[in-house]
Image: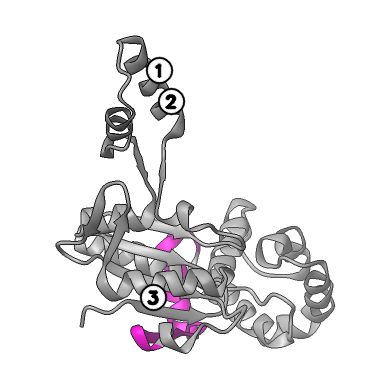
């Protein structure tokens, strides 16, 4: 379809991993733009290497060059251009471009992104237009910390990633941690799935399930109990209130596993 894929879901459900797996499966490089509040267009697109440009000007002047137009033409060349993720992907073409956590940027950046994704080209005043011969595969992820503009949503193919079923999450744990016993893996996944229903501030995602399983494996655990889980709760939960809530609920949860 030639459209970006917009993935939404709770933190930790594997949205970023989709891009990694896709790039690996297709044998394409993965280019990632990690979004954050205050992200500037230059950090996503390109910047000029001013330090190298200044050194080049001084070199030319030392060689007797005085013509300002020639000096300007010399320093605004592609060799002095620092390509950031979006420009890298457009120039490369055959690549997977991951724009991670787009919801952390502002509406101005969204508008810029919409324009770029409509034409797959950008204009650099000093060099001209850079157009992707083959548009990159673009994936955007969002944790829904704010609503994205409808125009951007309409430009994308949308998919919601929910927490996986017990069977699917168990397969993920077994694939990533083959050294964990079947019985313990089942109990870890069952526990995490029940913990997600406790109304926590930051419910654990699949990444936290793997962290907990890895911690138990490192501790040499063979079964689950409140005593075994206590030193590993920090791998599963990321807020003090959540740790206390789960610690209080363990006596009720353990018999259900």
User: Left or right: where does residue 245 sit relative to residue 134?
Assistant: right
**Residue 100: which disc?**
none
State the residue in front, 183 or 248: 248
- Give the residue pinned by disc 1: 58
Crowding near pointer 1: few (<14 within 10 Å), some, many (20+)? some
Residue 193 appears at what percent x and percent y? 60, 82
For mark 2, give the secondary structure.
helix
Residue 234 coordinates in the image, percent (x, y): 72, 61
Reading the image, the residue beneath label 2 is 54
Q: Are marks 1 and 2 in contact (CB under 8 Å)?
A: yes
Q: Give the secondary structure at mark 1.
A: helix
Asked whether residue 28 is in view, the answer is no
Displayed quadrant of residue 94? bottom left
91 in relation to 192, above or below:
above
Residue drawn where x is 24% and y is 56% of the image: 130
Q: Is residue 129 left or right of residue 8?
A: left
Judge depth for marks 2 and 3 and give the one in front.
Answer: 2
Residue 187: in magenta span? no
Q: Going from the N terminus, do you reach mark 2 or mark 3 first?
A: 2
Specify the quadrant that holds the N terminus: bottom left
Q: Which quarter of the rendered picture does the C terminus lie within?
A: bottom right
**Gap in angstroms between the C-alphas marked 3 and 1:** 40 Å
**Which of the two labelled residues, at mark 3 and mark 1, occupies the earlier sequence position?**
1
Q: Position of residue 169 (x, y in %)?
A: 47, 77
Secondary structure at badge 3 equals: helix
Residue 102 appears in the picture as rendered: yes
User: Image check: 249 left or right of 104?
Assistant: right
User: Magenta includes 172?
Assistant: yes
Disc 3: which residue: 114
Q: Which residues are magenta?
A: 154-180
Question: Mark 1 and mark 2: span between their CA atoms?
Answer: 6 Å
Residue at left 20%, top 61%? 132
């Amino acid at each position: 379809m030639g459209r970006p894929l917009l993935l939404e879901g709770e933190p930790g459900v594997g949205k970023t991993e989709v891009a990694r797996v896709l790039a690996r499966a297709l044998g394409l490089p993965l280019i990632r733009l990690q979004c954050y509040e205050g992200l500037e267009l230059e950090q996503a697109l390109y910047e000029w290497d001013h330090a190298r440009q200044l050194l080049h000007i001084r070199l030319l002047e030392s060689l007797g060059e005085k013509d300002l137009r020639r000096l300007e033409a010399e320093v605004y060349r592609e060799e002095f251009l620092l390509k950031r993720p979006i420009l890298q992907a457009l120039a490369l073409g055959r690549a997977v471009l991951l724009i991670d956590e787009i919801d952390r940027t502002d509406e101005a950046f969204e508008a810029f992104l919409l324009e770029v994704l409509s034409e797959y080209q950008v204009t650099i005043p000093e060099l001209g237009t850079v157009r992707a011969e083959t548009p990159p595969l673009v994936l955007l992820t969002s944790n829904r910390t704010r609503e994205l503009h409808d125009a951007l949503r309409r430009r994308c193919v949308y998919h919601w990633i929910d927490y996986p079923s017990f069977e699917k999450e168990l397969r993920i744990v077994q694939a990533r941690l083959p050294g964990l016993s079947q019985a313990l893996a089942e109990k870890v996944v069952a526990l995490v799935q029940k913990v997600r229903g406790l109304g926590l501030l930051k419910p654990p995602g699949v990444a936290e399930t793997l962290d907990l399983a890895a911690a138990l494996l490192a501790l040499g655990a063979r079964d689950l109990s409140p005593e075994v889980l206590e030193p590993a709760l920090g791998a599963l939960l990321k807020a003090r209130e959540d740790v206390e809530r789960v610690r209080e609920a363990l006596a009720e949860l353990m018999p259900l596993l």
